[in-house]
Amino acid sequence: MSNQKSFDPYDLFNKFSTQWEKQVNDLIMTNTNNPRFTRLLQKSTETSAMYKEMFKKSQELLGNQLHLPNKDDVANVAKVALQTEEKLDSLEEQIWNLQDSVSSTNKEIESIVGVSNDIIKLTKQLKTELSKTKLELTETKELRSELRVIKNELADVKGLKEEISILLQIMSEKNIGKKDQEESELASSQPK
């Protein structure tokens, strides 16, 4: 049983197509090598080309009368459509680039606004510090004028102290002189 071949449909189809191709090639070769067939084929090709040209011209005339587009018009429209698509793609790319630049510009503006807000806060702090410094300066001027007044009063007190010490000295000298005089008067009034 192992000597029997199994049925292979591909092999059968391959053999059939090879035989059919050979027969068709033989038929074509016999007919094309015939000069009469070649002349007949040439005449029919020329006639077909002439009718095709006439048909094309009449189709163009009819299309022009009915305002229908011809093959060239459709080709031109397709070309314009392709150019339009290319231009739209280019514009789309430019719009994306503009969007990117706008978003980066927005980010820069946001950072500038942030820095500006920081500067404004710092300026407000400096203004409050300046007003406090002005108040302190005014208070310092008032204290300085009060200190001058106190210094002048101290100078006056010192002058008074010197005058008092001079007066005390004078008084003590007078008291010593009076005491001496009183003693001498006492001594002279005492019996001897």
Image (spheres, rainbow, N blue to C red):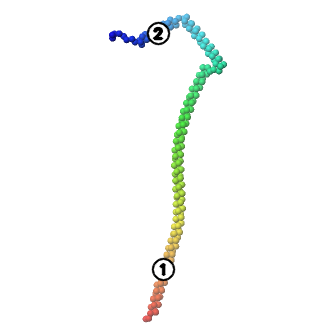
Amino acid type of disc 2? Glu
Q: Nearer the viewer, residue 59 or 79?
A: 59
Residue 83 rendering spot, x and y as whole percentages: 57, 27
Identify residue for label 1: 168
Give residue 60's quadrant in the image: top right
* Of labels 1 and 2, the one closer to you: 2
Q: State which quarter of the image contains the N terminus.
A: top left
Chain-order first, disc 1 or disc 2: 2
Q: State which quarter of the image contains the C terminus.
A: bottom left
Q: CA distance from mark 1 to mark 2?
A: 161 Å
Identify residue for label 2: 21
The 10 Å Cα crowd at callout 1, few under 14, some 14 to 19, many 20 or more, is few
Image point 65% across, 19% down: which residue? 66
The 10 Å Cα crowd at callout 2, few under 14, some 14 to 19, many 20 or more, is few
Image point 54% across, 33% down: which residue? 93
Residue 64 rendering spot, x and y as whole percentages: 65, 19
Q: Nearer the viewer, residue 16 or 8?
A: 8
Image point 53% across, 55% down: which residue? 128
Whether 135 is drawn above or below 23: the answer is below
Whether 189 is drawn above or below 75: the answer is below
